């Protein structure tokens, strides 16, 4: 019979087991760790990073936990060590992801999307998180963090020949799509007609300079349609380059179409514009552009596949709801901003790796019947990994007074609130009277 491990045997070493074996050397290579002081090894430094980024402790709390685990350290010293860690953390994160490690030997479907991150007290976007999800294995494929001024583009990702990339309407960039087509990477995305110069394509027609009279007005075309599912062979054209593709459009149910048009009017009202009639009409259709041949994937399959794009939104929801990625603490452009985000993403990736290490992969494969969602398993492993990071069994009781000093309030103009002096005197007098009555 297996004997359960004792709590004191579980340590941060368990966290490190899914990291690259040379994580120690990488810390020196990226100058995150140069010499031993209070923090004596790259492993200890990474544990401090996880206390700050993973457990979301502020600098002073991070210093307090380290003081209990090892020896007294100040929040200023922790800050100095953390601010040099971003290149190292980024290298560790990239090493854990499959991007560029191997060429896919079978069809690989990648779902791409981005999300905004806001710092404390800000109303706009401070950073953008760009993510690619492998839809079959349901695992993270690629992650990038950029400033708010860098928008969504498929050109920032590393795709391989044969990949099928699926994404939303924010990626309707003809030049980028043509670049991917030249690399033999197929796309499948929600069509935004105003952003895509599409032209009619006759069956068997070779690419040529498109004629203006063949420009596709998709609203007029769909108004004439009698079927609820319409397929249109097209050319995508931009700056002298062309590639063939298909537009598959499915009519939405009346109640769904009306809700979409209502949102369209509301969005226009907020921006001070009145939506065009074509825009309102097209809101009643789901339109998907793809370079995947109709011989390979039928129109109904393309539409059905596109609806699975929602899985990447669930990944963002898990990162933000379960792992608190949306609780960005450092302000914009601070030294610790990208350290916190990159450390949090490394923390999330390690949790994912430990989930698969303990429970296998079959339960979440998207090409078969799924037995559960990642949510509950992530919560269980999340709690386990937090216990490895915090390591309460190693806390030294002798360091409690030093920990208290680390956590004390800094001198400030306004002292912490206390009872009025008269009330405090009254309480002391009351206590004395009680003591006297007890003696009697």
Image (tube, grey):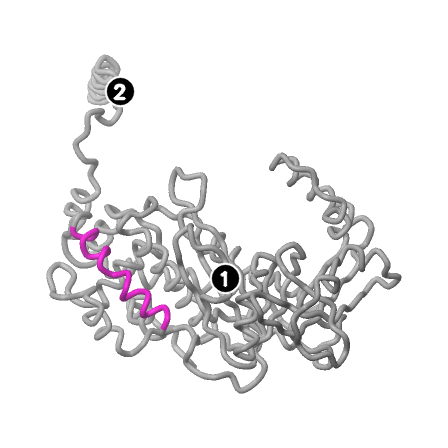
- Residue situated in front as seen by the camera: 170 or 11: 170
Where residue 172 appears, as percent x and y from the top left, is 59, 60
Residue at 40% across / 63% down in the picture? 384
Residue 113 in percent (x, y) is at 53, 60
Of the image marks 1 and 2, the number of the one nearer the N terminus? 1
Q: Residue at x 53, y 55 (%)?
A: 317
Q: For this view, does 60 lie left or right of residue 198?
A: left
Which residue is under mark 1? Answer: 153
Mark 2 residue crowding within 10 angstroms, few (<14) / some (14–19) / many (20+): few
Residue 354 lies in what quarter of the image?
A: bottom left
* Left or right relative to 234: residue 102: left
- For the residue pair 171 and 4, the one nearer the viewer reads as 171
Query: Dividing the image into 4 quarters, which one contains the C terminus?
Result: top left
Disc 1 residue crowd, few under 14, some 14–19, many 20+, Cα 10 Å: some
Residue visible at 63% across and 72% down? 370
Q: State which region is magenta.
A: 77-94
């Amino acid at each position: 019979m297996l004997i359960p491990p004792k709590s004191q045997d579980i340590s941060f070493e368990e966290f490190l087991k899914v990291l690259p074996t040379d994580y120690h050397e990488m810390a020196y290579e990226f100058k995150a760790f140069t010499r031993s002081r209070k923090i004596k090894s790259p492993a200890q430094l990474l544990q401090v990073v996880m206390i700050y980024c993973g457990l979301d402790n502020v600098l002073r709390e991070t210093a307090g936990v380290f003081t209990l685990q090892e020896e007294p350290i100040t929040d200023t010293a922790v800050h100095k060590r953390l601010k040099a860690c971003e290149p190292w953390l980024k290298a560790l994160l990239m090493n854990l992801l499959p991007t560029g490690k191997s060429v896919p030997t079978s069809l690989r479907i990648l779902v791409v999307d981005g999300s905004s991150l806001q710092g404390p007290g800000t109303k706009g976007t401070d950073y953008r998180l760009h993510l690619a999800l492998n839809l079959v294995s349901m695992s993270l494929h690629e992650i990038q963090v950029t400033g708010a001024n860098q928008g969504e583009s498929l050109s920032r990702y590393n795709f391989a020949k044969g990949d099928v990339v699926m994404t939303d309407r924010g990626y309707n960039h003809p030049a980028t799509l043509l670049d991917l087509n030249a690399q033999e990477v197929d796309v499948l995305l929600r069509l935004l007609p105003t952003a895509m110069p599409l032209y009619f394509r006759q069956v068997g027609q070779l690419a040529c300079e498109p004629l203006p009279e063949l420009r596709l007005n998709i609203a007029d075309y769909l108004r004439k349609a009698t079927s609820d599912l319409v397929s249109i062979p097209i050319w995508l054209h931009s700056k002298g380059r062309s590639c063939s593709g298909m537009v598959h459009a499915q009519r939405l149910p009346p109640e769904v179409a009306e809700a979409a048009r209502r949102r369209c009017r509301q969005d226009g009202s907020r921006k001070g514009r009145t939506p065009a009639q074509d825009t309102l009409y097209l809101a009643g259709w789901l339109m998907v552009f793809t370079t995947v041949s109709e011989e390979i994937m039928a129109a109904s399959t393309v539409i059905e596949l596109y609806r699975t794009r929602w899985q990447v939104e669930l990944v963002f929801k898990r990162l933000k709801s379960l792992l608190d990625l949306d609780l960005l603490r450092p302000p914009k452009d601070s030294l610790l901003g990208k350290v916190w985000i990159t450390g949090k993403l490394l923390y999330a990736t390690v949790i994912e790796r430990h989930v698969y290490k303990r429970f296998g992969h079959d339960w979440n494969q998207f090409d078969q019947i799924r037995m559960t969602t990642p949510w509950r398993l992530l919560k269980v492993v999340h709690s386990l990994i937090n216990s490895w990071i915090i390591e309460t069994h190693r806390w030294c009781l002798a360091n409690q007074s030093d920990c208290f000093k680390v956590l004390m309030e800094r001198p400030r103009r306004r002292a912490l609130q206390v009872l009025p002096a008269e009330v405090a005197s009254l309480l002391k007098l009351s206590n004395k009277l009680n003591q006297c009555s007890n003696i009697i």
